[in-house]
Image (cartoon, helix red, strand yellow):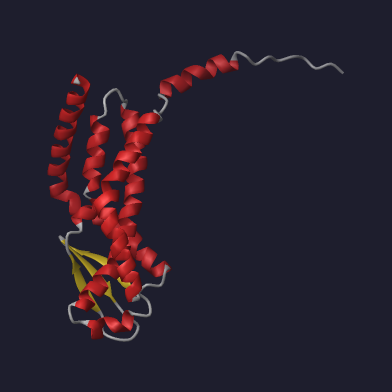
Amino acid sequence: MTVSVHFLLRFVVASSLLMGLWLGWGVDYLDLVAPAVNSLTVWLDVPFQLIRDGDAVLYAYHPPVGRSFRLLATGQESIYLNLVALGAVFAATPGRSTSWRLGWGTVAFGLLWMTHVVSFYMGGSVALWQFAEGGSLSLVHPLASWIPASRGDLYLQILTHWNLWGRYSICVLMWIVACAHPLPAPSTVIARQPSTLRHWTLRPTTS
């Protein structure tokens, strides 16, 4: 029970500190996400881009025929706020080395980053057709060939379930996997090398 209480206290302290830091510079994280989202839209030939304008996040649509326009994304913090929980649980895990925290934390961060890129990409289709439902179908219609309404509905269902069950479940899953596979300490690897070399035997060759 004492170990559990200590872990919980460490998690609360770590998450509070990380949240305080995140409130100050968390929006800058989008500078790591937006270029990947935009590369994905170019690769898939989907005519929109993700833009950060200060603290605002915009979807900029540019149909080949018709008017270009921008939509303001709201609540985007919910997409990547699981980084705070991920960092806190790795920081609070007892009995682990700094190399384990940094190694597995980096792997987990990379996986979460990929989910954020995909989420923002899907959000571009969802935002477009939610905007159309507000009475702007004529403005959205030129994009229907590239972003059909059926895709917007599908992505909305996926993101809804992901936000309910997936965003934090994947953090827990990655933490469980990391705890089950501790990284070897560098000193252990170095110590094994001389003992391996001592087993080598050199014999003269005979002709």
Name the image quarter holding residue 92: top left
Residue 120: x and y in percent read: 29, 61
Residue sitting at x 26%, y 45%? 168
Pick the front one: 22 or 11: 11
Residue 106: x and y in percent read: 34, 40
Residue 51: x and y in percent read: 24, 66
Residue sitting at x 25%, y 35%? 89
Residue sitting at x 14%, y 33%? 13
Residue sitting at x 77%, y 14%? 204
Q: Taking 174 as reference, is 66 above or below it?
A: below
Horizontal placement of 102 versus 92: left or right?
right
Q: Taking 65 as reference, is 120 above or below it?
A: above
* Residue at the farthest right position: 207
Pick the front one: 156 or 68: 156
Horizontal placement of 140 versus 16: left or right?
right
Horizontal placement of 97 versus 72: left or right?
right
- Quadrant containing the C terminus is top right
